[in-house]
Amino acid sequence: MDLVTRADRAPGPQAKLLAPVDETAVLDRCAQYRDGLKGAGVSFPAALLRFTTVREWMRRQRVALHVTTDGELALAVVAGTEPGRIVIHPHEGLGRPTHRTVGARVVVSSSGQVARLAAPAGERRQVLVDATADDVSALASEVLAHGRLDLVGLHCRLALGDVVGALTVSRAIGEMSWIQRRHDVLVTQISVANLDVGQRCERWILRRVVGAISEVIDDACARHRFPRPGLTLAPTCGALLVGQ
């Protein structure tokens, strides 16, 4: 048994300590999500690096990690995570990425974040635009206006209780198609965060979820005549923590 700070569903500051958590059960749940989401990349919360066995498993499996605080970023760096496997979600609890994370992907949701990210000289950054931003098209244009920023994808967040996000994902594909037409830039990645299938975490359920999301992507790509992007799914911290 161990104790862990449970995270809110959306990226942001960690919630207060709620309950003891079985580390072995957390590891099993992580493996279930990884195995059940075949056909898509999986990004895990860096907060789980506090667990020794989970941290060692993540290192061996070379999984991607999403970080939302400076503390989580430090955990990922100390654990030896390659920058290319880190996705950073800037907000009030996370400062500007440093030289240690050059090569990491960064999700931006505002003009201010784009400006701060583009400020350091000589450092190229891979950027994903938050598909729930007020004006995704304008934000994508701002990213592309900076020579040191590479727009590689769009980032979607599922609403509470929504495990497929058909409308959100479909709209994101539409935005990606617009970016290609407007800027002649092919955006090749789409990530979907806040995935949580509930306590009944079985591989067949996860396979049906990834299949449903893939079908939404395929239909939207056919409608917009857009090449299918690579898909990454990010389960919530709460989906992976198993209390006793």
Image (spheres, rainbow, N blue to C red):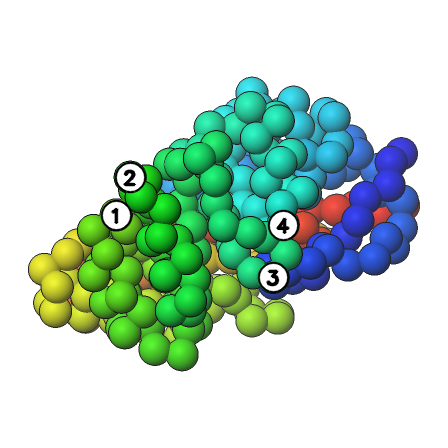
Q: CA distance from mark 1 to mark 2?
A: 7 Å
Which amino acid type is shown beneath numbered disc 3? Glu
Which tag, 3 or 4, sits closer to the chain's start?
4
Q: Residue furthest bottom?
A: 134
Q: Residues within 10 Å of mark 2 (few under 14, many from 20)?
A: few
Front residue of 41 and 222: 41
Front residue of 189 and 29: 189
Q: Which mark is residue 69?
A: 4
Location of mark 1 (residue):
148
Which amino acid type is shown beneath numbered disc 2? Gly
Front residue of 110 and 187: 110
Contact between marks 1 and 2 (CB within 8 A): the answer is yes
Q: Quadrant of the C terminus?
A: top right
- At x 62% / y 45%, what residue is drawn? 70
Q: Residues within 10 Å of mark 1 (few under 14, many from 20)?
A: some
Q: Residues within 10 Å of mark 3 (few under 14, many from 20)?
A: few
Which amino acid type is shown beneath numbered disc 1? Arg
Which tag, 1 or 4, sits closer to the chain's start?
4
Which tag, 4 or 2, sits closer to the chain's start?
4
Q: Which mark is residue 92?
A: 3
Q: Is residue 207 visible?
A: no
